[in-house]
Image: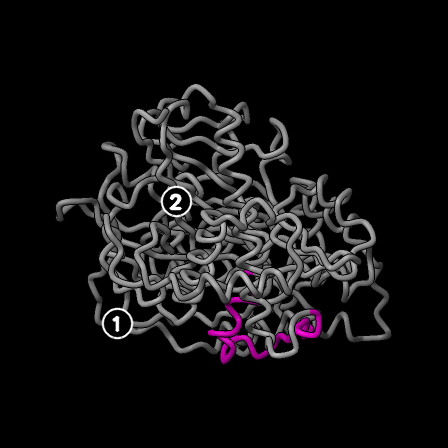
Amino acid sequence: MVFSQLDVNIGIDFGTSFTKVCLWDEDTASRVVTFAGASLKDSLLLSKVAILPDHRLVAGLTESEWQIETRGAEIEIDFIKMRLANFDLEHEGHWFSFTDISSYARHDLNQRGCIENLCIFYLARVIQRSKKWFIHKFPNLVKNQEINWSANIGVPVRYYNSKALETFQKVLGISFLICNSTEADNLEKFTLEDLDRVVRFLEPNLSKNIPCFAIPEVAAGTYAFTASRSAKEGDYTFIDIGSGTVESVFFSFDRETRRPRIKVLCPYVHPLGIDTLIEGVSKISNIPRIELEKLLLNGNSIVDELHSIIQQYAKPLTKKDFVAAVAINGSLDKESQQYDDLYISQQRLESLMDDSEIIINPRNRVLMELMLWQMAIHLQTSKVINYKQKKTEIFLCGGGARILFYTHSIRATQRAFSQYRATVKPYQFKELFLPNEDELSMSDLSRNEFSRFNIAYGLSLPPSQMPMFTLPDSCHSAQIDGLLRRDVARLATLIRQETATRNSIEVDIDWRERPNQALGGRVQA
C-alpha cells in the first residue's frame, strides 16, 4: 500500500567515453551510483552501444561487464554523444566522418535517426539501471512510497547555444518515456527494429511535460562551489578534462539576484581529452595504446622528459614561430620582465620530425607528438584566460584533472604566451568544494574521487536549487567532435584562427524557464 510520494532525481553526466550518475531524493541527499560493486570502475559506464549477432542491443555497462557481454559482437558504436552532437554542429566538425551504420537498421531510417535511437537506448539503459540500483540499495526508503522520477543530463555550454540542445532533450525525453512504459521490462532484448518501433510510438508523447532537462555542465560542475556560503564573488575559469574533449569556460559568479548567478562569458571545447590524445598519438606513432597510457600517467617523469627534449633541440624563436611547449626553469627576471625559460616551436618540432637526416629515437618522437598537443591545450587555455586579464583562478574537474601532463600544460600557458607581460599572474588551481557527507554520499568510494562526479552531483540536484545563468549571445568555440587520425598541428592552427572573442550582448537565461519545444511547454522549477 502506498502511503506517500518520494521525489527522486537522476543526474546523468553523459561523457564521451564514460557516463557517471548521481541520485538525489528529497528525504536524504545525493549519492554516487555504483552499478556493479563498490569500486570506481563499477561506477563508470562505457558510453557506447554494441549489436550482437542475434541483433540485440547492449549498452549501459561497466568496462568489465562490457568485456563479458559483448563478446562476438557484430559492431561496437562508440562516441555516441559526439556522433549525436555532430549532426547539429557539422559545420564545425568537418574534419571528422563517422561510419554510416544505418544499414543495421530499418531501410527508411537514416544515419541521424539511427544514432538518435542508439542514444535513446543507451540513456534508457542508464536510467533503468539507476532506478534498479536505488530500489535494491534502499528498500526501506522506497517501501510504501510512490516514486516520482525525474532526470537531468549535462551538455557543454557550446551545445546549449545550438540546435544540439533540443536534440539532447529529445533523446533524454524518449528514453525517460521508455523506462516508464511497459516496454521497460523488455529493454535488454531490444533489437534496432524493436527500438525504432517503440520510439515511433512514444515520440508523439513528447508534447506533454516530461520531468527531464538538459543543463549546462558548467552549472552542474560548479554547483558545489556556488552553493557554499564561503564562496567569494568574482571571475573564475572552469576546465573539464574529459575522455574525449576539454571544455574551458570563463565565468563570473555573483549573488546579486534571488539565487546565485553564473555569467558565462567565454566557452571553448575541443577534442583534447585523454582518450582522444592517446588515440591520436598512438595512431600516428604506431605504438600500443597501453604503452602511451603508461607514459601519460607516469607523473613527473613525462614532464622531465619533455623538458629534456626542449633543452636539447630548442632554438631562438622568430616572430612567425608558434610556441608548442616551454621548459620552465627559473623565475621572473624583474629587470627584464622575462622568465629564464626555453621554448620549442611548432615549426621546430615539425622540421625535426620530417628531417630524415636527424635520428630521433621512438620515445622522443612520441614526446614530440605530445608537445604538439600541448600547443593546442595552450591555445585553448589562453583564449579563456585572456578574455579578461589577471583572472587566473581555475577549477579543474574530470578524469584528467590529476594527470600531470594536463595540469602542467595548462599552467605553462602563462609562460608559453608570455602573459606575465600583461601582468597575468601564475595560474592558481582551486580545489572543488567537497560537499558534506549529509549532502553527498560517495557510496563507499574515496571522497578524493569527487572531481570525477562533481558534474553528476550538480545534475542530481532539483532545478530549483541550481544557480541562474547568463549566456553570451553566441559561442565562439569551434566544436570538433570525433576520434580519428588527425593532424594535431592543424587542430592547433584551427583554434588559433578562430574568430577572436568579441564583447557579446549578454542574454539573461534562467534555463528552468527556457522554452522547450522538444518536450513541450516550459521547464518547471
Q: Which quarter shows the N terminus?
A: top left
Q: Which residue is mark 2?
A: 459
At 44% from the left and 26% from the top, the residue drawn is 441
The crowd level at tag 2 (other Cα within 10 Å; few <14, some 14-19, many 20+) is many
Q: CA distance from mark 1 to mark 2?
A: 30 Å
Q: Amino acid at mark 1?
A: Asn
Residue 86 covered by magenta stretch: yes
Residue at 64% from the left image edge and 48% from the top image edge = 188
Q: Is residue 114 visible?
A: yes
Rendered image: mark on residue 485:
none
Horizontal side of 373 relative to 293 (left or right) equals left
Residue positioned most to the front: 1
Is residue 303 one of those drawn in magenta? no
Q: Position of residue 486 (x, y in %)?
A: 67, 71
Q: Is residue 333 visible?
A: no
In the displayed structure, would residue 144 be above or below residue 228?
above
Residue at image x 75%, y 70%? 352
Up/down of 273 relative to 184, above or below: below
Residue 109, percent from left and from top: 59, 75
Q: Which residues are magenta?
A: 81-104
Are discs 1 and 2 less than 8 Å apart at CB?
Answer: no
Residue 301 picture location, percent across and down:
70, 42
Label 2: state its secondary structure. Answer: helix
In terms of secondary structure, where does tag 1 sit? loop
Q: Which residue is mark 1?
A: 503
* Residue 427 percent coordinates (x, y): 42, 48
Say few, some or many: other residues with alpha carbon within 10 Å of mark 1 (under 14 / 14 to 19 / 20 or more): few
